[in-house]
Amino acid sequence: MTSSEAAKTVSNPHQAGPPLWLLAELTYRCPLQCPYCSNPLDFASTEQELTTDEWVSVLRQGRAMGAAQLGFSGGEPLVRQDLPDLIAEARHLGYYSNLITSGLGLSEAKVNAFRDAGLDHIQVSFQASDPELNNAVAGSRKAFDQKLAMARAVKEAGYPMVLNFVIHRHNIHQMNDIMALCERLGADYVELATCQYYGWAFKNREGLMPSRAQLEKAEAEVQAYRQQLAVSGSAMKLIFVTPDYYEERPKACMNGWGSLFLTVAPDGTALPCHSAKLLPIDFPSVREMELKTIWYDSPGFNHYRGDSWMPEPCRSCDEKGKDFGGCRCQAYLLTGNAVNADPVCSKSSHHDRILAARRAADHATAGIDELTYRNADNSRLFFRG
Amino acid sequence: MARVPRLRPGFRFQWEPVQDCYVLLYPEGMVKLNGSAGAILNEVDGQRSVADIVATLEQQFPDAGALEGDVNDFLRDACQQHWIEMS
């Protein structure tokens, strides 16, 4: 970067605020094969990952812009050998850093070393409450025992314990077992994230999406468990994410395009969310441009800021300031055009596609073994076509 | 016994120059604090009692009058939110 470039001020045509949340997707490499992975289908085509120095530069630029929350994610971020250095740099810069991991490749020694380097939080993901189902979903024979051991090690090392379960039709019946497991482990936060349909999950939607009856039962079980926790004075928080496909109004996706969240993909592509790579938009790379210029001035990040891009029914909708027309990726996946209203909205002329998916979920019979697993071989099929 | 507040594990309190305010950071979340909440939490160090904190704040803000009620209200709320704990 030349000094004139560094001194350049940004024009910020939409008066965007700073990116408070930086998600560093360090790699797409992962030992697991979860069929609902949010990584792009063609992840195996990704060019060279950013180097340690390039990541350090991204962290510094993001922090200077105001980012306070930092996520280390992937793929499985533990496969990056420089993770301890990046953690130390993040702490030095004043980030609150979160490691989002499958727990595979983690050890008690690493858990402690990361803490000493300044990591604030480790989130361990699970696939189910028992080894058999967990390992079947993860496509790994030994995942569950390792996850349990690592969840305990995280707690032992004094981190807050955050456990994440992606919920779908094959594990939604385990809700009570999952919550009981989390309570036994001493979790502080439990994310019960019903699957959202992007990336591999969109590909596998019919085999993953729960029926409305399954969902309502699960919601009632979570509610009852919350009351039980309140009575016992437990601080464990249950965060239940309802799937978009059962809503009548879209979510305010990412709190608005280019409003708070900045993702940097393994190859340096800067994105307004981790799914946006699937959109036919040219997003800049941190290898070519300063992060500040990317965030405030690049066409990619300004694409859906404000509301002048909105067609009907969003344009005249009195809720457009609240939900921003929903999710651009979902609009693109379901209608072929990202400017359309998110079809989750009952006002969308494409809402019938959501209704059809719900009907299909009432009659779906596919087993776990019929899902397309997220691995490099399957990924190559997508980019080779 | 004097009550001593401290941040719960996993919570970090810090000044954010870009946002021009104190924030409380926790796993994948952030609370922007208003002026008085920031001033109170700034005194919470796991060592000093509520009474000490009230005395310090009353010295810092002599025009604010008695602060015990406000500080207690805020700390009770912060306990209920599980941001802090009392020992």
Image: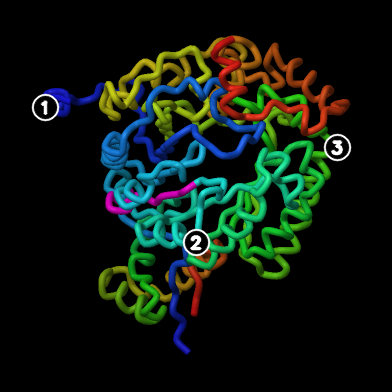
Q: Nearer the viewer, residue B8 or A267?
A: A267
Taking the spot 72% from the left edge, 21% from the top edge, the residue there is: A346
Q: Is residue A27 above or below residue A114?
A: above
The residue under label 2 is which amino acid type?
Glu
Q: Of the residues under marks 1 and 3, which one precedes in the sequence?
A: 1
Q: Of the residues under marks 1 and 2, which one precedes in the sequence?
A: 1
Quarter of the picture holding the C terminus of chain A:
top right
One can see residue A241 in this view: no
Q: Is residue A51 inside the magenta stretch?
A: no
Q: Is residue A16 above or below residue A180?
A: above
Q: Nearer the viewer, mark 1 or mark 3?
A: 1
The residue under label 1 is which amino acid type?
Ser
Is residue B44 found left or right of A363 in the rendered image? left
* C-alpha gap between disc 1 and disc 3: 60 Å
Helix, strand or loop at label 3? It is: helix
Numbered range of the magenta stretch: A90-99
- Residue A290, horizontal then vertical, whole percent: 26, 27
Residue picked out by circle 3: A213
Residue picked out by circle 2: A108
Q: Nearer the viewer, residue B78 or A294?
A: A294
Is residue B66 found left or right of A371 in the rendered image? left
Write down the quadrant of residue A320 in the picture. Answer: top right
